Every structure is written in C-alpha cells, then in structure tokens.
Amino acid sequence: MIVAAKWIVTAFAAVALLGMVQVQAQDSPQRKEIKRADLGGTTNMEVILSTAEYKPGESIPRHIHHGIEAFYVLQGATVETPDGKQIQLPTGAGNMNLRDVPHAGFKVVGDTSLKILTVHIVDKGAPLYDAVPK
C-alpha cells in the first residue's frame, strides 16, 4: 500500500513538473522570472523582475512590450544585427525600451554569452512581449 502511494505521488509530481516545463516553453527559455508583483495604486500594471542568458548563436527576436522594459547588462557580449553589423553590449550598460517600440532582433556572436537583468512594468494580464505588428 505504501509503495503504491509513493508511485501515485511520484506520478503526480512528474505530471506537475511537465506542466511547469510546458508553461515555461511558452515564454523564452532563456528568461528566468525572479519576482512578479502588482504595481499598486489605481493602475492595472505589474512589475516583473527577470534574468536572461543568451548563448552564442542564440537570437533575440524583434519584439515589443506592453509597457516599459529596463535592462542592465550583467555580462557583456557581441551581437549581430540582421544587416551583419556587430555591436558590443558591454557589461554595466543599461537602457530602457518604451511601450510598443520594436527592439532587439539580433544574434549573439563570439564566444561569450549575453546575460541581462530586466525589469518590466507592463499591463497586467497581457503577454510580456509580442512580435512586432505588421
């Protein structure tokens, strides 16, 4: 009886873990959410703190956010734009991407991963990011 109960618990845990993996796959696999909270007040916005790591050869597709994204480069790297221009994103750099303004659309090149910390202040319940509208 105890052995059967252990197998049932193990099966439920495996199903739950697969469900978590499936949810994460809907988002960027490079992004790891640290914390999410309501902005408060009378707004319908939330704050999302995340880190992301993009390894050499990985791309960050061009996208928009439904709010503001602030980022800080934890580990700099070289990225390449679609037209072949290489840009160095140095450690310690930071910037903000404004609501609905397309950004990114580059690939990490060289032998160093790009690691960033992001803070998003976005519409609650909206996707964190969307493809650029056509």
Image: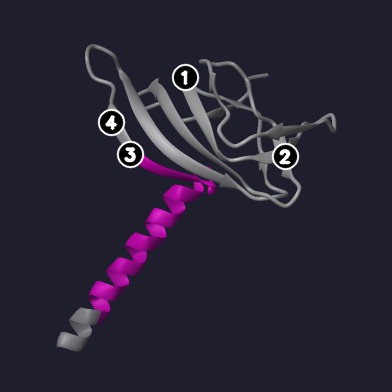
Badge 3 element: strand
Disc 4 marks a residue whose amino acid type is: Ala
Look at the image and say whether residue 25 sits in the magenta stretch.
yes
Q: Quadrant of residue 91?
A: top right
Q: Magenta part of the protein: which range? A: 7-35
Q: CA distance from mark 2 to mark 1?
A: 24 Å
* Disc sitting over residue 68 in the figure: 1
Q: Nearer the viewer, residue 8 or 115?
A: 115
Badge 4 element: strand
Crowding near the residue tagged with mark 3, few <14, some 14–19, many ≥20 C-alpha atoms within 10 Å: few
According to the image, label 3 marks what residue? 35
Q: Are marks 4 and 2 in contact (CB under 8 Å)?
A: no
Disc 3 marks a residue whose amino acid type is: Lys
According to the image, label 4 marks what residue? 37
- Main secondary-structure element of the magenta-colored stretch: helix
Q: Position of residue 106 (x, y in %)?
A: 71, 34
Q: Are marks 4 and 3 in contact (CB under 8 Å)?
A: yes
Q: Position of residue 67 (x, y in %)?
A: 45, 18
Q: CA distance from mark 1 to mark 3?
A: 16 Å
Q: Is residue 49 left or right of residue 77?
A: left
Q: Residue at x 41, y 22 (%)?
A: 122
According to the image, label 2 marks what residue? 78
How many numbered markers are drawn? 4
Asked whether residue 127 is in view, the answer is no
Disc 2 marks a residue whose amino acid type is: Thr
Image quarter where the C terminus lies is: top right
Q: Residue at x 51, y 15 (%)?
A: 99
Depth-wise, is mark 2 or mark 3 nearer the camera?
2
